Image (spheres, rainbow, N blue to C red):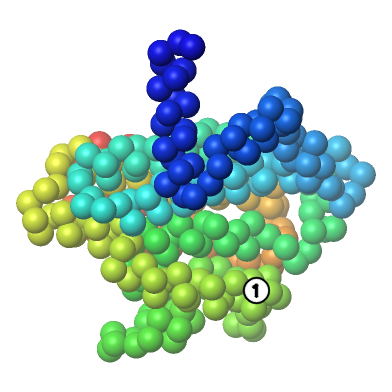
Amino acid sequence: MHESLASKLNQLEQKFAAMGQDMGSYLEGLLQADYLTYWDYIHLETLLSLQNPKTAYPDELIFVTYHQITELYFKLILHEIDQIAHQHALTADFFTARMGRVNRYFSLLEESFSVMITGMEREQFLKFRMALLPSSGFQSVQFRQIEIVSTDFRNLLIEAPEEPAYISDLYEFMYWKRGATELATQQRTLTLRQFDQHYGPMLIRLAEDYQLKNLRHWYQHLERNGQVTPALIATLREYDWRVNIRWKLAHLRSAVQYLHKEPEDIRATGGTNWQTYLPPRQQQVIFFPELWSADELDRWGQSPNHPGHH
């Protein structure tokens, strides 16, 4: 028997013995098992069965597929942030490397948004969107999770009380709730009520869990210990810029493309007041305010250009 093969069998025997398992049985199972195929590994048939348009308009397939792709990237982003949050003895290099991955995902998402902006016929969109009411991309819980795990909870609030309060109380002041409120009546849209009923308790628990392990917390921890590097600062600034300016502007361009109409704009599918909600200069969401100059903070969202190094 080849020496390297014998070594591997010996290692396997030790592994299974440590667990009180019989290696022979596992080898027999390996003999009986079929070869793994690509389509089984990625569940291709299942994946391709998940796009189910609600109308006969061809471009709706683009719409639903693009949103599913976006949610898969969000899953990868949350996966990277989770590694940072739970990394033992976190270093600036590990932090920077994982945030580099996250920035790459958001870069791909932004570049792909042209599919939404110019990749569908406007007339088709305005027709099939009516079959989707009251659902809205506003209801993407994974994006809300990304925001919550990125910064102090209070950085996501508007007009919240300054005194200490439970996160369950502060949740009512989340900035994005302003985007799903009817301007005339100040009533919350069905889109928001559905979302809060389905996801509100989970998001509150997540915010509570991440109070001491969100991205900003870990940056401040490294900064206090003198472990911050210029590369980490640049990477976190890019992240702030990509999520809170570029990604928001991509959505705004899409809304203008399909919903702008003289003399009055068309309502978004969820009833959200997109004209005042979507512009990043209106939202003023900033994950790492300490990484931006007073002038940059004052001009937040007014320029989409890359911020460069701090």
Seen in the picture, residue 108 relative to 201 is either above or below; the reply is: above
Seen in the picture, residue 174 relative to 117 is either above or below; the reply is: below
Which of the two residues, 174 or 144, is positioned nearer the viewer here? 144
Q: Position of residue 213 (x, y in %)?
A: 31, 63
- Position of 222 with respect to 95 (left or right) is left
Which of the two residues, 179 or 50, is positioned nearer the viewer here? 50
Seen in the picture, residue 289 relative to 98 is either above or below; the reply is: below
Q: Position of residue 260 (x, y in %)?
A: 66, 51
Seen in the picture, residue 115 relative to 196 is either above or below; the reply is: above
Residue name at image x 88 percent, y 42 percent: 57
Pointer 1 residue = 198
Q: Quadrant of residue 66?
A: top right
The amino acid at mark 1 is His
Q: Quadrant of residue 113?
A: top right
Extreme residue in the right direction = 56
Which of the two residues, 97 or 268, is positioned nearer the viewer here? 97
On the question of residue 286 being in view, the answer is: no
Residue name at image x 87 percent, y 52 percent: 54
